[in-house]
Amino acid sequence: MDQWAGVVLAAGDGVRMRSRLAKVLHRVCGKELIRYPVDLMNQLGIGKVVVVVSPGNGEAVRGLLGDSVEYVIQPAVKGTGDALGRAEDLLKGQADNVMVLTADAPLVRPESVKPLMAAHVDSSRNMTFLTCRTGFAQDFGRVVRDENGQVVEIVEAADNTDTDNEIAEVNGSVYCFRDRWLWDSVESVGAAPSGEKYITSLVRIGSSGNSTVQAITTEDPDELMGVNDRLQLSHVEAVLRQRIRDRWMLSGVTMPDPSTVYIDAEATIGQDTVILPNTSIIGRSVIGEDCEIGPNSVIRDSKLGRGCRATASVLEESTMEDGANIGPFSHLRPGAYLESGVHLGNFVEVKESRFAAGAVMGHFGYVGDASIGAGTNLGAGMVTCNYDGKDKHRTDIGENAFIGCDTMLVAPVTVGAGAITGAGAVVTKDVPAGRLAVGVPAKIRSRNPETN
């Protein structure tokens, strides 16, 4: 038998989000809410995880998480206690202990949950849960203790008549249970006046029996912040973004103005890289060491090697090898690939194209569906005419070619190694290696005027 199994409660309606998208699929720092507790359980070594979903969000959650977890449906919204009970058939007897997390609290950290798990395992208690003390208790269940300091009850926010904002101990909805006790007890949970069954009723059941319930307090109230509406979503995002920035700065990344920098949860950044103001690093972007990104750049799901520079430019699903640089005001669209030492200057757009090592395009232009040879120079205003109104066609340019300013390359077309196009040429036919193409439409000439 495993020591731990896990349950993630993700069946709530999320009505206050005012959204057609299920609440648990809204993103915080580029990552869906539901993925935070699932990933946390994976980090903690919990192998068997059951996600409780609703009929409305089940298909979408399955599409996101796939077979990494198991699923059970809560047919109607009848509270967290009812939702937890739905996991009994899949989990009873599968592990010594069960951890339960909610899908709308992405700030819970392993540094707080590990001591909670250890305290639970080392004690004789059947239920251990995380609390904090805060003056903002409106959306939290309040912890009630007896004269001996023992937890005896949690009063849910919906049933709480005390509206004062004094500092109170509140429930963080992070629970550890003994397996056998949990499944025997959850069946005893009665309905509240609202008709819902609360998981917090297990506190009263546990404290009234022979065993006691233990609460472990975290010093960071932000950690237990949940998401019920868009305003709270923004508050949680602000906390997590600051954590992410702090982590990277402490790991050797420089940010002169960190408050203006957005870094998503799954992005990675190398040591001694500088992230300048108003820059966003989005999705699963990977940035190497000794880079300079920004100011005013957006890096989305892209990979940059060591010593790259992206100045006031946008990169989407693109790759830059070591020493490549771009900008200002350029755009790498999906499929763009710059090999080592490539330079793209102002107002250059690249899509589904590969620039071989050392190729240069210093000024405005468009390269789409093309291969650019090593050492080739593309002049200002050069455009690959890759779309004929129906289909996309490729352009191939060889090594050390020189493409003159305002050249139009009408694909499909090949320009050979060492070939040259004159300024303003409209190239509709292949240019052999070492030859010259000039005019509209371009004619092929020898690079030696005496042989033309």
Image (cartoon, rainbow, N blue to C red):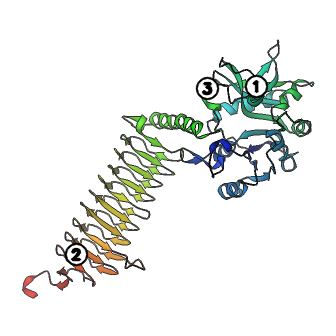
* Above or below for 145 versus 294: above
Outermost residue toward the top in this view: 147
At a point 43% along the width and 37% down the height, the residue shown is 252
Q: Which residue bears the numbered disc 3? A: 220
Callout in the foreground (2, 3): 3
Q: Nearer the viewer, residue 336 or 190?
A: 190
Of callouts 2 and 3, the N-terminal one: 3
Q: Amino acid at mark 3?
A: Asp
Residue 290 percent across, percent down from the top left = 36, 45
Say whether residue 416 is left or right of residue 196: left
Q: Quadrant of residue 12?
A: top right
Report, in whole angstroms, how far the alpha carbon at label 2 lies from the one at label 1. Answer: 79 Å
Residue 162 percent across, percent down from the top left = 73, 20
If the image is split into quadrants, where does the C terminus sit? bottom left
Outermost residue toward the bottom in this view: 452
Say whether residue 241 is left or right of residue 357: right
Q: Nearer the viewer, residue 218 or 298?
A: 298
Q: Which residue bears the numbered disc 1? A: 160
Say whether residue 123 is left or right of residue 303: right
Q: Which residue bears the numbered disc 2? A: 418
Outermost residue toward the left in this view: 450
* Above or below for 188 versus 319: above
Report, in whole angstroms, how far the alpha carbon at label 1 lies from the one at label 3. Answer: 23 Å
> Label 1's element?
loop
Q: Is residue 34 visible?
A: no
If the image is split into quadrants, where does the N terminus sit? top right
Say whether residue 385 is left or right of residue 38: left
Of callouts 2 and 1, the N-terminal one: 1
Residue 149: mark: none
